Image (spheres, grey):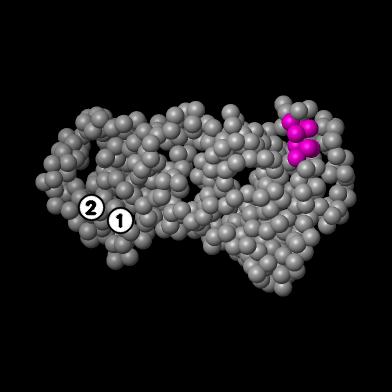
Amino acid sequence: RELRRFFFGDVFKEGVYKPLHGELFRPDAGARWKSWLSPSFEAVLAAARKGDPRPALREEAPGVYSFELFTPGFCDMLLAEVEHAQQTNREQLDRPNGMNRYGIVLNQLGLEPLITALQREHLAPLQGSLFPEEGSTCDDHHCFIVRYKAGEDVGLDMHEDDADVTLNVCLGKEFEAATLSFCGLAADDNHRKFAHTYSHEKGRAVIHLGRHRHGADDIASGERVNFILWSTSSAYRASEAYLRHRRHSATAEQPDPICLSYTHDSDHTKYAKKPSSEEAIARGVMLDRVEERYAKYKRPVHDLASPLEEINTTPSVLLFLEGLAPQVQHKLFTELMSVAGQVLPRFDTPSDKAPPLLFFVAVQPVGAVPQVRAFSGCRGSPALAVLDIDGERVWRFGSETLDATAILEFVGAYLAGTLAASPLGDGGDGGAEETDAKRSRADA
């Protein structure tokens, strides 16, 4: 069997965990779901099996639906089981992801058979009818608990889930605020535009695509505990559609502040104040990822095969070396590093921002290199250019001799505004289709 994407073991099967409610862990526990599901869910399921469940659902926003799923009694029983597990086996239980610090993985606890029955027998028709492309072939899941409480995790930074379809059910307890805000889909121009704020109700589920940007708003008081089920489809993830759906729009509209993510958006501090470390941690920000992004900004020269996403918005010096002898590549790369080391200190760029001029080198024709070369219109190697994708302009080096002095003079002339620019694709290899950089940006 292939290695599963989400696998944390099973402390119940290993004999490490002694449950509070044994009926949840029985091999035939899935047969009891009908007594644990809200009676109104039968109408939802019946409508889904007929092909269109939407009349039986509450549409919170385009692509976001809610409905009653768990009975209050089941919410209380599962909540008691979770608290028992956290009290007795906390050290054996992993946190569910890099953002939630106080949850647990229900599959790891030993509830995978129960959750699998819920997914396959009760949720599959609903997911498949609402989201045919993403939800009709789900064959695995990651199920976990999240908890929000003052002094712990108070909210969750804006994000998209590592799920194809997400189900989110409030189990309780008593709380104020702690709402869930939705923006747009990852690949859409409005993926950082506010769409809706959802208020949790005990036992009520909200279902949406994993690529739908959302975040948990701060809790004002009390404690909120939620059941999260991430359903995934190996068939969908092997498709071209999956890659297309997860690629952020290069022509995105200016973001609404509520839709910004400090973890995932490199331009966060352009639109909002940088949070303190304490504020960031309390909202589940992955500070290691943020620091990794800032560390990349400090590099003088970047690999064009996997460029920073800022290449789409920031003028960039490009040095193409594909196909040259290794010793020639090394010499020219060293000279580009020298030039970048002289130019970049002039900008006095804050540590949390990319400099106003980036430097990239291409050594192999892989990754984004062919696409960016087509944008720049550069032929052969070595080749040097300054590319402004956002401004749809390029400045190409025209001399035969390329060394550190020539690179420095070329970059200096660009910064002084004395070079003549050409439109993207003009004189290049790729033809007219490359001239519309607004529609086809570099795949950073």
Magenta stretch holds residue 142: no
Q: Magenta span covers which residues?
A: 79-86
Q: Mark 1 sits on what residue?
A: 375
Q: What element carries label 1?
A: helix
Which x, y percent locates residue 431?
Answer: 29, 65
Which x, y percent locates residue 387?
Answer: 26, 49
- Is residue 166 or residue 170 the one in the foreground? 170
Residue 394: image tag: 2
Q: In which quarter of the image is residue 59?
A: bottom right
Amino acid carrying label 1: it is: Phe
Against 240, is 171 above or below? Answer: above
Against 338, is 321 above or below? Answer: below
Q: How far apart are marks 1 and 2 (CA)?
A: 8 Å
Residue 32, visible in the rendered structure: yes
- Label 2, residues with CA under 10 Å away: few <14, some 14-19, many ≥20: many
Residue furthest bottom as drawn: 50
Amino acid carrying label 2: it is: Val
Marks 1 and 2, the one that precedes in the sequence: 1
Against 91, is 72 above or below? Answer: below
